[in-house]
Amino acid sequence: MSNNNNSDLTQIPGIGNATAKKLMAEGINSYEDFINADPKKIAKIVKSSEKKVLDWISNAKELISSQDIELSSETNEEIEETMEFVIEESEKPDIQKEKSQGKIDYGISDLPGVGPATLKKLKEAGLLSLRAIAITPKQIIMDDSGLGDKTIEKIIKAAQELLNINFKSASEVWEERRLLKRISTGSSNLDEVLAGGIETRALTEFFGEYRTGKTQIMHQLCVNVQLPEEKGGLNGKALYIDTEGTFRPERIIQMADALDLDYNKVLKNIIFARAYNSDHQIMLAKDASNIIDEENIKLIIVDSLIGHFRSEYIGRGTLADRQQTLNSHLHDLLRLTEIHDDLAIVVSNQVQSKPDVFYGNPLRATGGNIVAHGSTIRIYLRKGKENQRVAKIVDAPHLPEAEAVFTLSEDGIRD
Ligand SMILES: Nc1ncnc2c1ncn2[C@@H]1O[C@H](COP(=O)(O)OP(=O)(O)OP(=O)(O)O)[C@@H](O)[C@H]1O
Ligand SMILES: [Mg+2]
């Protein structure tokens, strides 16, 4: 079957045994037959795309013109087992070869075993990219897509391989961090303690008592993210998930005016969603994945992260249940920052006063340790004189515990 003669169609890169058999059954027995056949007809016979067939034809031409046909002739027993699989497989790119050529622009449909039906299920589950598949836990993909255990395991592994998700050197990590983009808060004091502003690929949590400026900062970031990079923005849109009903377009207009921006445009670039309860909030975060790239969203706001959880779980379930649901919600959000480029997530968190604490700060963010561990950067806000506020960086892996004073003004966040 695999001698190097002119009738072994499997020698053509991209054509497997099953495909070759189908072609031979239709009277296409040699390279010449193959090259001269109608690509449309071949596509039908082997149930593949015309584009793939054209690729195979050019492969066949190359093969003929090169005299040294030196291809490996292993017949893959495993692949022979399922015809379907061979067809799907034969459409897949030669990953190793293309990787070495620096071609990395793969999609989900390049994964082995992913045909139209699977693709549809993955998309419906909000898994739109290889990165999404590579880093989403198997159980979550299972729950959201309804696909089977084995299938998911296989595609996750393949996605990780395609993306080269494995070990990397500290210098690569450094290079990535060096290129991290940031959004200016509007206050250079605050930007400075944040090493330049709100980090992308991270979740930043502002926590503090009422009226300490959490919601004001979030409004300001929705405006600033739209600025060009040299002005502290990311040229992108914002998605605002409002759980408390405190989003005010009139504040956006004031802030846009203060920066001489056309407020109509600025308002249009803020996609707003009111979350009515914690389930709805969780759903919105999951759905966000579908619009982030399409709408060029660079900032997601959740104001506030745990308000609904706190009120709803009073009469329902235990604290452990709440923590678990909150934890998975937080991880859904964190995952978005890993899946999508240059995306910042900013959440607010109310504080509860804990008079029974005898040491440390009596004001602690609600949500307890779960929120503390899931967030990447935490900023504690407190009131200063009049409209001044003090921000203190807490728990950031790479920032000192510095403080910054900023003011809340009609124009927005300023020094
Ligand atoms: N138009 C404005 N001009 C000047 N300052 C304003 C304006 N609107 C709001 N502020 C300032 O913002 C403060 C309210 O801050 P913000 O709503 O961000 O608090 P918060 O931390 O979100 O509180 P909560 O926990 O209640 O949601 C007001 O006390 C005021 O100082
Ligand atoms: Mg608020």
Image (spheres, rainbow, N blue to C red):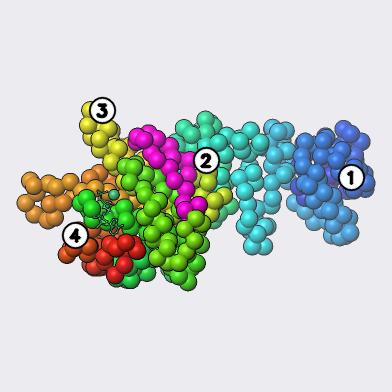
As measured in the structure, the alpha-carbon distance from the residue carrying label 4 to the one carrying label 1 is: 77 Å
Majority secondary structure of magenta residues: helix
Residue 102 quadrant: bottom right
**Could you tell me which secondary element the residue under label 4 belongs to?**
strand
Q: Which numbered disc flags the more N-terminal residue, 4 or 1?
A: 1
Q: Which numbered disc flags the more N-terminal residue, 3 or 2?
A: 2
Circles 3 and 1 in contact, beta carbons < 8 Å: no
Q: Which numbered disc flags the more N-terminal residue, 4 or 2?
A: 2
Residue 56 image position (x, y, % from top left): 81, 49
Circles 3 and 2 in contact, beta carbons < 8 Å: no
As measured in the structure, the alpha-carbon distance from the residue carrying label 4 to the one carrying label 2 is: 40 Å
Which quarter of the figure is the C terminus placed in? bottom left
Which amino acid type corresponds to the residue marked 1 in the rendered image?
A: Phe
As measured in the structure, the alpha-carbon distance from the residue carrying label 3 to the one carrying label 4 is: 34 Å
Taking 305 as reference, is 256 above or below it? Answer: below
Highlighted magenta segment, given as a residue range: 266-288
Judging by the rendered image, the residue that carries numbered circle 3 is 316
Judging by the rendered image, the residue that carries numbered circle 4 is 383
Q: Who's the residue at 89% across and 59% down the image?
A: 65
Q: Who's the residue at 22% across and 62% down the image?
A: 387
Q: Across the whole image, how many numbered discs are drawn on residues?
A: 4
Q: Which numbered disc flags the more N-terminal residue, 2 or 1?
A: 1
As measured in the structure, the alpha-carbon distance from the residue carrying label 3 to the one carrying label 2 is: 29 Å
Q: Which label lies toward us, 4 or 2?
A: 4
Residue 83 quadrant: top right
Mark 1 beta carbon near ligand 2 (under 8 Å): no
Which amino acid type corresponds to the residue marked 4 in the rendered image?
A: Lys
**Could you tell me which secondary element the residue under label 3 belongs to?**
loop
Given residues 265 and 342, the one toward you in this image is: 265
Which amino acid type corresponds to the residue marked 2 in the rendered image?
A: Gly
For label 3, the crowd category at 10 Å Cα-Cα, with few meaning under 14, some 14 to 19 and many 20 or more, is: few
Circles 4 and 1 in contact, beta carbons < 8 Å: no
